Every structure is written in C-alpha cells, then in structure tokens.
Amino acid sequence: MHPAVYKVGLQYLSGDIWGGNARCIAMFQAFKEAIKDYSTPPEKTLIRDLTARISSYVSFLIECRPLSNSMGNAIKFLKNRIAKLPLVLSESEAKATLMSDVDRFINEKIIIAEKVIVKHAVTKIRDGDVLLTYGASSVVEMILLHAHELGKQFRVVVVDSRPKLEGQLLLRRLVRKGLSCTYTHVNAVSCIMQEVTRVFLGASSVLSNGTVYSRVGTACVAMVAHAFRVPVLVCCEAYKFHERVQLDSICFNELGNPEAISKVHGREDINYLDGFVNQEKLQLLNLVYDATPSDYISMIITDYGMIPPTSVPVIVREYRREHLWS
C-alpha cells in the first residue's frame, strides 16, 4: 500500500477530510503520488498492472469509508485513461501523461467547475434576499462570499442538524467575512422558511431521474421550501452526476456511527440511550445521505449551465461521451 493512499484512507476514517470535492481531490492527489513512484514489475505490462494497483487502492479506501458517486466517476475516468495509453509510450512518458490527466481533471471538473457555478448562481441573488442553506457546502459558501464581494445586500440563514453540525463551521466563516447570518436547527425550518426568498443547497450526487442525493436532512429542507413556494436551487458539478436511479434513501446509503446519534455533544446529562447500541432488538440508524425527489427542485446549477431536473439525463450522456469514453 502506497503511503499517500494509506494516509488519505486514515483521514477519511477519522473524518479529517469530508465533503465530496475535498475527498475526491485528496484521493486523486494520493493516486498521483502513487503513479509517480510506480515502476512496472518484470514480465508485466504497465496498463494491466497499474489498473490492478489502482483497484487495490480503491478497495482500501472503501474499507475506510464508502466511496461517493463522484469519486466513482473520477476512478472510472482514471482507469479509462490508463486503458487508452498508447503502447508506444515509455514508462516515464505514460506516468507523465497520467499525472497530467489527473491534474486536468481536478482543475477542469472541480476547481473551474466551481467558479462557473458561482458565476451562474450569483445572478439569482438580488438585494434584500434572504437565502437559506443547509449544512456546509463548499460551492454554496463560494457563491455567498462572491455575492457579498459584489456588494449585494442579503441575509443568510444557516440551517444545521446533529450529529455533525457542519453548519457551525460555515457560519463562522461567513460571519468572519462580514455576512449577516441567522443560525437555526432543522426542526425550526418551517418557522424560518416564511421569511426566506431562495434556498441554495449542495449535493453529493445528482441521479439520472433528477433525484438529488445529499447530506441527510436536505430532503426535509427542500420539501418545506416547496410547501412555502420558495425556489430550491441545487449547486452541483457535472462530474457528480450519475446514471443510477434511486427512489428512496434506504435501498442504498452510507451508515454513520450509531453512537453519534445516541449522545448530544456537550450534554452529559442526556444519556437515555447509553448501552442501547448493543441491544439485540434495537438498531440505531444514522443515515449519512437522503434522496430529494426532483419535484421539490426548482433548478440545478452546474458547470454546463442552469438546467431543470428533467434535463439531468442529457448532462449524464454528454459528460460520459466527452470525458469518460473520449
């Protein structure tokens, strides 16, 4: 196991690296280090052996934490580039080509994609708006900060939930930059939604039927917004789009630590579920993601432009043709 891959796996396991883009970038940077140090064993070909090596790294990362859909797409891209390496290239040339492809993917599909999404999204923010966001999405944070830099006058409502309380980190960063913010928990979202004009949400993935797969609680926020006739705008890079179809959050999901929902941080007196984790007839279910039906999404803002959820299959098809199988 390459040390860079091992280090990233441990960071996934401890939760030091979280968020779809950060996890994908860290994984690709580790693969880049592994490719740099790779040498083809005797009587083996680079294409086959390196593909097998990458597969073993992926298996280790899955043991540490299940892959997101976006990471699966990124791995497909890398394996496709390895498979299409010209046989006439020397080992050093092949490695240089692959490292260049990795850098290009990170730059085009994540960094530049985020900037394009920000450029599109700020056109939807007007003076006097009250913008609600849930959890902590890196691209939504960039949108809010850029709109503030442009001099737009608006207020941000950060909605958060246990057990991760990611919204607190976002709140601190926004307040530090001088934005006017309100902080509340998801159980109060129906109360605060009355004054909200737009909802901006991040996404872990967008599935081909328009379903948005994101941190648990997103569906609740989107449904309440829909009930109050508040537009819901989902910001998601095209590399996170996936051809899979999912109708609920139960048939496929990631399970978090059950002890995280049995304890309340900072409240030692709340201990009603102590010892219940090992109860045979009780299962504490800590889902990491949920699925938001396309009916509750007004618009998806991507690096390909602003689209309705019904147009997601077009993006999946075009992205696949342009980047995975080119």
Image: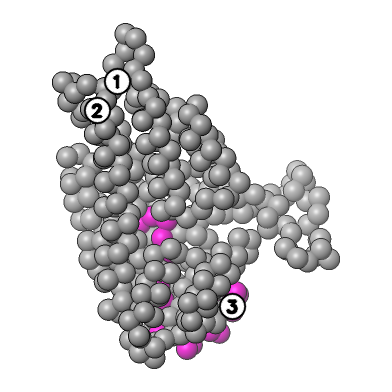
| Residue denoted by label 2 | 94
The residue located at (32%, 81%) in the rendering is 150
Q: Give the amino acid type for the residue marked by disc 3 in the picture.
A: Thr
The magenta-colored residue range is 184-208
| Residue denoted by label 1 | 46
For disc 3, the neighbor class at 10 Å (few under 14, some 14 to 19, many from 20) is some
| Residue denoted by label 3 | 184
**On screen, 128 above or below 54?**
below
Residue nearer the viewer, 323 or 272:
323
For marks 1 and 3, the one nearer the N-term is: 1
Marks 3 and 2, Cα distance to the nearest angstrom?
52 Å
User: Are discs 1 and 2 less than 8 Å apart at CB?
Assistant: yes
Q: Give the amino acid type for the residue marked by disc 1 in the picture.
A: Leu
For marks 1 and 2, the one nearer the N-term is: 1
Marks 1 and 2, Cα distance to the nearest angstrom?
9 Å
User: Are discs 3 and 2 less than 8 Å apart at CB?
Assistant: no
**On screen, 10 above or below 177?**
above
